[in-house]
Amino acid sequence: MRPPAEAIGTLALIVGAIAVAIFIGVEGALVYAVWRYRASRVAMPARFDRNTRLELAWTAAPALTLAVVFVLMLGTLRDIGAATDAQLRIRATGHQWWWEFDYSGIVTANEMHIPIDTAIDIELASVDVNHSFWVPELGGKTDMIPGQINHLRLLTRRPGVYLGQCAEFCGVEHAWMRIRVVAETKEDFDRWLATQGSPATASGDGARVFQSNTCVNCHAIRGTSARGEAGPDLTHVGGRATIAAGVLPSDAASIRAWLVDPQRYKPGAFMPRVPLSDADLDALASYLGSLR
Amino acid sequence: MIAREARPAAPALDRTILGMFLFIASEAIFFLSVVVAYLASREPGLADARANLDLGRTAIFSVALFSSSATVAVANARRDVRWLGATMLLGAIFLVGQGSEYARLATIGIGPSSALFGTTFFTLTGLHGAHVLVGLIALAALAAATTRRTRGVGPITWEAVSLYWHFVDAVWVVVFSVVYLGTFL
Amino acid sequence: MSAVPLWVARPAGASAAGWLRTVDHKEIGVLYIGMGVALFALGGIESLVMRAQLATPNARLVDPELYDQLFTVHGVTMMLLAVVPLLVGFANYLVPLMIGAPDVAYPRLNALSFWLSLVGAIVVYFSWIAGGAPDAGWFSYPPLAERAFAPGPGVDYYILGLAVNGAGTIIGAINLAVTILLMRAPGLRISRLPLFVWMTLVTSFLILGAYPALSGGLVMLFVDRQLGGHFFDPTAGGQPLLWQHVFWFFGHPEVYILVLPAMGMVSEVIPVFSGKPIFGYRFVAASSVAIGFLSFSVWAHHMFAVGLNEFETLLFSVTSMLIAIPTGVKIFNWTATMIGGRIRLLTPMLFAIGFIAMFVIGGLTGVSLAVVPLDLQTTDTYYVVGHLHYVLFGGTMLGVFAGAYYWFPKMTGRLLSERLGRWHFWTAFVGLNLTFLPMHWLGVQGMARRMWTYAADTGWGPWNFVETAGAFVLAVSMAIFALNVVRSLRGGAIAGDDPWDAFTLEWTTTSPPPPENFRTLPAVTSRRPLWDRKHPEMRDAS
């Protein structure tokens, strides 16, 4: 079975070509009629007003065209939607306004890694409102609706970074709910997954700041006592390319700026501003950045 | 040919009656959407419905509403205010029955917010009840106008009011079937 | 030179109280149109603020809370509060004149419809100063629209406003349908109805079938929000998708409610300015009926991404493709009407041709949305925003402008300026293509709709800037139209009864028409009674 994006792309080219042909034909006829029959060229208009055979023809022609499009579509449908050939299952859960990815118990956020040449079944869930999981270059979107589980088949042959976006309006920070998908070789993926599965190793002053503040109410760092579930799991946050679902890069300086005033970068997000001393901020930012 | 052209295009249908039919059609779509919502939410609420609805009593009160269709038909045919009165009485009996069902459910803690069953039940039957109330007001207005005016009220008004009442009755046939019979049968 | 426009020469006098009390269909039509214009301007201002915010990445002109309110109220305004009153206003004014009736079937109910519609709109807009406008999108999907996620009063104003507005629209539709079915002049059989009246009749039935479903959904949402109900609450067994089904059962016919009357206007303008009867009258009328029926069977193509089963997916894909066929039939018949004609390229005709040219684009992208795999890429993106604006601006609004230039002389007794009209048309044409065409590729590239801003690394900035520039060109275009109207009312050329050499009954009476509409009615023996009167030697066959 084909990668969904490839199947959709091929179909789009064919349907697009048909549409362009119709567009040129119809607009051409319109322009021709206006030019040929403008008042300065015609003394007396004709009076004909019906031709049943013509009417039937231009009812039947679109019907046949659409029948062709429908059949082409049927050939594409099995490549998308729920994966029957899945070799890997990932649970993606939408939150206002970030993504949780669960690889059979190994949890990460906002950045999803997938192995290439592997059919993947994404189970889509939501804990609050409707979201929609969409990475255009990997395939179509499927909604995340609380109370039900939807499925989306992913498969890609090219390693690389694919960017996506929540596509269903989900509240104030719908815009800053970006997805980053890293497609890599099976070996790289396995190594990444093993890292994600291991507890955090870093420690130091920043860890103390994190543990002794309200951070722990919402965030988990495995290997420590922080077990909050309202916000993204931070066990390996420094290993992700961005923070806050694509708002800022994950270097220590950006993390610090984010901690100083989250609302400046993502107004409306539930991340509060935690009053900390400059020294604590430095320590916390460098600690989080080192969680790779 | 000319004679045929000169004939007025307007057919025999009165505009008030046609308007009432269209209004009833739009009301039917309105109820349809809520009935569909009830059916779509039926499974999660079914246990609550089975445990708490009183089919027997409601069936008796329903008979009152169903028979009021007959009395309003007689009232309309004879232009008789006494039959209108009988219709209003039967409609009022139905509303009292619904009220007592609501009161009983309320005492066992079931309301619009208690669970999904309460939400759908009170919305659907409440909307119907509100329409019965509007129908009663229309019947009362018709009765009042008929007794006050010496020349009476035109036949079209009688016709239109009784059409509406038949509709309110027909909605209950559906609601009763879906909510009560559908739960227990 | 009189500074008093002719259209205030009206039975109730020019007083405000007269307008409040009026039950004359023409005056109520003018009230509806005035309401539509005012709300169209408000919706337009909202869209300009949004476009300004999106002109550059990471902009902070408005905050996300305000942006969400802007696009919600813009959508509600344009879909329900502005264009519906505009179209109903034209229908109110024109239908009795086009069928040779003295008024609508129920003049007093007609006034009630208008005032209910207006009060509903005021309720929605009152929310801006009463704690916040609705912010869950014009289709207000729960759970986001539930109290837990939208605790402010905005969604409640949305529910109340749309319910009241909808009641007015439903009553108005009953009135128009009964008027058309029972009050036609002698000889004006259904098969001779002007096509604008045909499409108004179909639209009325669409309103009667669709709006009550919205009312039902609004009641449920109200119960959830105000009485603690659980219709759409997944934590208590309710289903968020139930709302989507009910809403789109209304929402898709609503699109045709907005498009069909404009198609009707174009179907009047094109024959007159081609000097020919409409080509394939029966097919144009029948295709409207077909669109009417099919429009109730396509709603779930708005929901291909929600996890429908295979049967539902294929069913709604087929029906959504089918509806393209009667739409195509109309395009072909309008073009065939022009072929062989003598085309006078005056402003109404320019807009009518523009309507066809732009509607074709919206129609073709519409078919792509029926093709499920393509829909899954494009739904809820700017591609859809572009598509729907080609249908509703490129289509409906250009059609309404065609109708406005065409019938303005009948309503006021004065012609609009051709020179300003051409400026209006070309600025609108350029502006709408600049604004809405780039949306298609931005959507495919990943720009979801309803984003209050976007990151610079997306590369979407330049095309968004083009769109914003286009939106301001459109604003200039609307200003030119306003200028044209004001100048014409103050001293435009006198139109006379029949300035366009038209075919239908409304042009047989004076401009503006007297309170009773007609002093004498010509005999109707064909679809073009006025043509027959002007050309007795070459009357149309009945």
Image: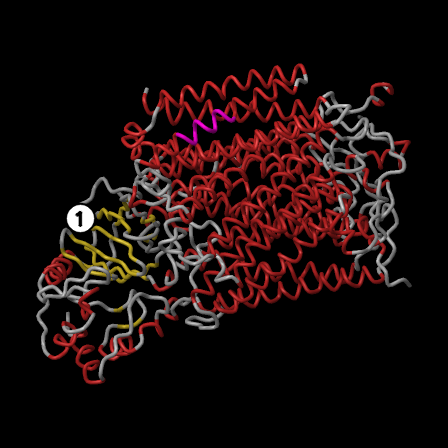
Instruction: Write down the chain letter for disc 1.
Output: A
Point out the image quarter for the C terminus of chain B.
top left
Q: Image quadrant of residue B107?
A: top left
Measured as percent of width and height from the top left, residue B172 is found at 47, 25
Q: What residue type is labelled 1?
A: Leu
Residue B6 locus on image (x, y percent): 85, 23
The magenta span reads B92-100
Main secondary structure along the magenta-highlighted residues:
helix
Image-based side of A99 in relation to B151, left or right: left
Q: Relative to B55, say whether C98 is above or below.
A: below
Q: Provide residue A73's location: percent of width, then percent of height.
A: 39, 39
At x 76%, y 36%, the residue is C277
Q: Quadrant of residue A110?
A: bottom left
Residue A147 vs residue B109, the one in the foreground: B109
Q: Does the magenta stretch include residue B96?
A: yes
Q: What residue is drawn where x is 82% and y is 42%?
A: C502
The answer to whether C190 appears left or right of B84 in the picture is right
Of the pair A269 and A113, the residue shown nearer to us: A269
Asked whether C204 or C133 is in front, the reply is C133
Furthest residue in direction bottom, as rendered: A279
The quadrant of the rendering that contains the N terminus of chain B is: top right
Category of crowding for the residue at label 1, using alpha-carbon neighbours closer than 10 angstroms: few (below 14), some (14–19), many (at least 20): some
Label 1 residue SS? strand
Apparent side of residue B157 relative to residue A120 in the rendered image (left or right): right
The vertical placement of C441 against C175, above or below, is below
Front one among C157 and C204: C157
Where residue C328 sits in the image (x, y, percent)? 58, 39
Q: Name the residue under label 1.
A: A88
Q: Is residue B46 above or below residue A5?
A: above
